[in-house]
Image (cartoon, rainbow, N blue to C red):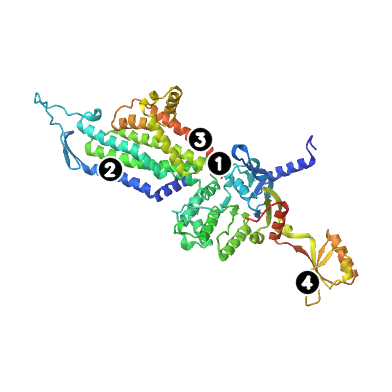
């Protein structure tokens, strides 16, 4: 241990160094943003020091209530705002360098294309700005217009487009440079259910091709379906992070399907087993919820039930929906509704 | 950056007012070409007709002696023909300076603010471009349009006059550079205010205020009519604020009429002001959060 520095501090520092040294798709180290108020008063801490790493090939979902710092984080990573402190890198390259954004595609929430351009011209223009060679632009634009079902409107001015069409064009724009990392802010906003499904399929197709996706959406069910890992921000802090599977699995709760427990046995288990309401099924089996601290305790409980001649049909870990988790986490750490 | 210049030119093309400016420029030189009819004999002007009216030259006589006298020649020209060319070119250059700059400002003034609109700037900043390239690309696009307009108007007028009269006044072409430079100086006010406030309206108001201030400061008696601390302030502002009237009165007409410019100081001082404001605009844009 270094003089004056605790082991934990050294560990955190080394973890940060490692996070920036290994070329993750996205890595942040102590990244923070504070918006100063008038005369330096009433400063808003939009993002507290954040350490985060997104692996290449992941679909990473960012959740949080209004004002949680999600948009601020995306803005910092894409150079739209400047960090107050900390560092961040895209594929190991500091976000302070414009070149860090070369392998990146971005679909902002309320994007606005020049209304006088056609869809095809729009794609070619933004591809040019992204550094796509001229020889590739036309073919790539045609392919993507076909992929997002805008071929028939390819030569129409953008100002005549509906919200859904604009969203699909925005997605095509984000993919023009064959990015390795795509930031999507509410990608299905304003899109009809069929289009929404198509976009979801496209995202999964991109993931299969190795593209990393950074998804910011208020549709929790959508995040749950496509994301491999999620992070929940609240009041500028990272309050939960992990795979969807790990976060939604309630470790201490199991569901038991078995023959009915004798009432005296049930009463003697001190609340470790509770009957689920209306839980008896036509086969004569009943459903219970088991609350035990860990797996050995679960097995000990099952042994006790079997000793009492209870026949076990099934035991499965209980999973929350992502929405349940989100509400629980947000209520525990402070505020309101998802955005 | 070429993509941003292209985007700016497309945006300007979509604005009908820019097409209108080119149309007006076309009307000016077409009218001049068709209205001016000259009879030139042995390199001298024997007769001229402007909009169908005859102009009399060279037949003035001294009432006392009855001897023919040389006609009065404007702008220090050597011949009446040269004077006529200088007069036409001075008129067009003056119009381009006093009216053209204002019209171009109205046509292009909103472009910096529109670049910074949410939804548009997000897309641009997410590309592998520096902020300097983004703002620079937009300004280059505006500059390219203004330069094209000036070359089209003043270049065409110069060619028409030169071909019709045989009087070639190459110094007139320097007026293109001066008018362009002063447009760029005035546009620096729009740029810095638009980057700072993201408001096109405030950009216009600030620019018009600077133009008004420069006109007021150009009144010679102004500093005589105020007391000591204000007098120094006025003298200081005269140095700092772009000298729009000074350039328009002392430099543009001189170039148009082939005369020597007594002092380039008003232009140089204005250019310094413009450079300082552009530097400020780029610094503000680099630090701005969106």
- Chain at numbered mark 2: B
- Chain at numbered mark 4: A
On residue B29, the disc is: 2
- Between tags 2 and 1, which lies in front? 1
Have a look at marks 2 and 1 and say if they share a chain.
yes
Q: CA distance from mark 2 to mark 3?
A: 39 Å
Contact between labelled residues 3 and 1, with CB atoms less than 8 Å apart? no
- Chain at numbered mark 3: B
Name which of mark 2 and mark 3 comes first in the sequence.
2
Q: Secondary structure at mark 4?
A: loop
- Residue where numbered disc 1 is placed: B288
Left or right of A125: which side holds B248?
A: left
- Between tags 4 and 1, which lies in front? 4
Instruction: Tell me where residue A218 appears, x and y as whole percent.
Output: 62, 57
On residue A279, the disc is: 4
Have a look at marks 2 and 3 and say if they share a chain.
yes
Instruction: Tell me where residue A6 appears, x and y as whole percent.
Output: 79, 39
Mark 1 Cα within 10 Å, few/some/many (few <14, many 20+)?
Answer: some
- Residue where numbered disc 3 is placed: B280
Q: Secondary structure at mark 1?
A: loop
Have a look at marks 4 and 2 and say if they share a chain.
no
* Number of residue marks: 4
Contact between labelled residues 1 and 2, with CB atoms less than 8 Å apart? no
Is residue A294 visible to us here? yes
């Amino acid at each position: 241990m270094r003089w004056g520095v605790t082991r934990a501090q050294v560990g955190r520092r080394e973890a940060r160094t490692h996070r920036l040294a290994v070329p993750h798709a996205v890595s942040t180290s102590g990244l923070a943003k504070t918006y100063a108020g008038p005369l330096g008063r009433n400063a808003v801490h939009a993002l507290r020091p954040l350490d985060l790493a997104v692996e290449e090939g992941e679909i990473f979902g960012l959740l949080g209530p209004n004002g949680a710092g999600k948009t601020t984080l995306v803005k910092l990573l894409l150079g739209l705002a400047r960090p107050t402190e900390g560092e961040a890198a895209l594929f190991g390259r500091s976000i302070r360098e414009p070149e860090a954004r070369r392998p990146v595609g971005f679909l902002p929430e309320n994007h606005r294309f020049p209304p006088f351009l056609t869809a095809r011209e729009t794609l070619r223009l933004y591809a040019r700005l992204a550094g796509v060679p001229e020889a590739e632009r036309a073919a790539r634009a045609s392919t993507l217009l076909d992929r997002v079902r805008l071929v028939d409107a390819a030569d129409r001015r953008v100002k005549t487009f509906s919200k859904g069409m604009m969203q699909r064009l925005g997605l095509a724009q984000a993919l023009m440079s064959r990015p390795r990392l795509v930031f999507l802010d509410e990608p299905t906003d304003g899109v009809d259910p069929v289009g929404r499904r198509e976009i979801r399929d496209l995202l999964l197709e991109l993931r299969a091709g190795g593209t990393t996706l950074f998804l910011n959406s208020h549709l929790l069910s959508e995040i749950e379906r496509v994301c491999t890992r999620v992070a929940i921000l609240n009041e500028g802090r990272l309050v939960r992070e992990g795979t969807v599977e790990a976060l939604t699995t309630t470790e201490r709760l199991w569901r038991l399907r078995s023959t009915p427990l004798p009432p005296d046995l049930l009463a003697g288990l001190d609340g470790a087993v509770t009957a689920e309401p209306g839980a008896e099924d036509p086969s004569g089996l009943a459903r219970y919820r088991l609350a035990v601290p860990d797996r050995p305790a679960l097995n000990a409980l099952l042994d006790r039930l079997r000793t009492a001649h209870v026949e076990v049909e099934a035991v499965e870990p209980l999973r929350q929906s992502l929405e349940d988790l989100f509400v629980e986490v947000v209520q525990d750490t402070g505020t309101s509704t998802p955005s | 950056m070429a993509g941003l210049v292209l985007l700016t030119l497309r945006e300007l093309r979509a604005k009908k007012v820019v097409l209108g400016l080119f149309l007006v420029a076309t009307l000016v030189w077409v009218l001049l070409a068709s209205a001016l009819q000259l009879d030139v004999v042995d390199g001298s002007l024997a007769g001229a007709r402007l909009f169908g009216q005859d102009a009399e030259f060279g037949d003035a006589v001294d009432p006392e002696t009855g001897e023919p006298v040389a006609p009065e020649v404007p702008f220090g020209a050597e011949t009446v023909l040269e004077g006529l060319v200088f007069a036409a070119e001075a008129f067009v250059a003056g119009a381009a300076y006093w009216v053209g700059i204002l019209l171009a400002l109205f046509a292009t003034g909103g472009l910096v603010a529109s670049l910074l609109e949410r939804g548009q700037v997000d897309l641009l900043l997410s590309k592998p471009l520096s902020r300097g390239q983004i703002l620079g690309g937009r300004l280059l696009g505006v500059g390219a349009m203004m330069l094209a307009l000036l070359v089209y108007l003043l270049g065409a007028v110069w060619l028409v006059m030169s071909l019709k009269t045989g009087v070639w006044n190459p110094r007139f072409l320097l007026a293109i550079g001066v008018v362009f430079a002063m447009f760029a100086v005035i546009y620096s006010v729009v740029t810095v205010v638009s980057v700072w406030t993201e408001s096109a309206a405030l950009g216009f108001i600030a620019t018009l205020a600077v133009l008004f201030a420069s006109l007021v400061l150009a009144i010679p008696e102004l500093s005589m009519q105020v007391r000591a601390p204000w007098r120094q302030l006025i003298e200081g502002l005269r140095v700092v604020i772009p000298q729009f009237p000074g350039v328009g009165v002392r430099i543009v007409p001189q170039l148009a009429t082939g005369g020597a410019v007594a002092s380039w100081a008003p232009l140089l001082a204005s250019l310094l002001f413009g450079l300082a404001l552009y530097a400020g605009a780029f610094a503000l844009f680099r630090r701005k959060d969106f």
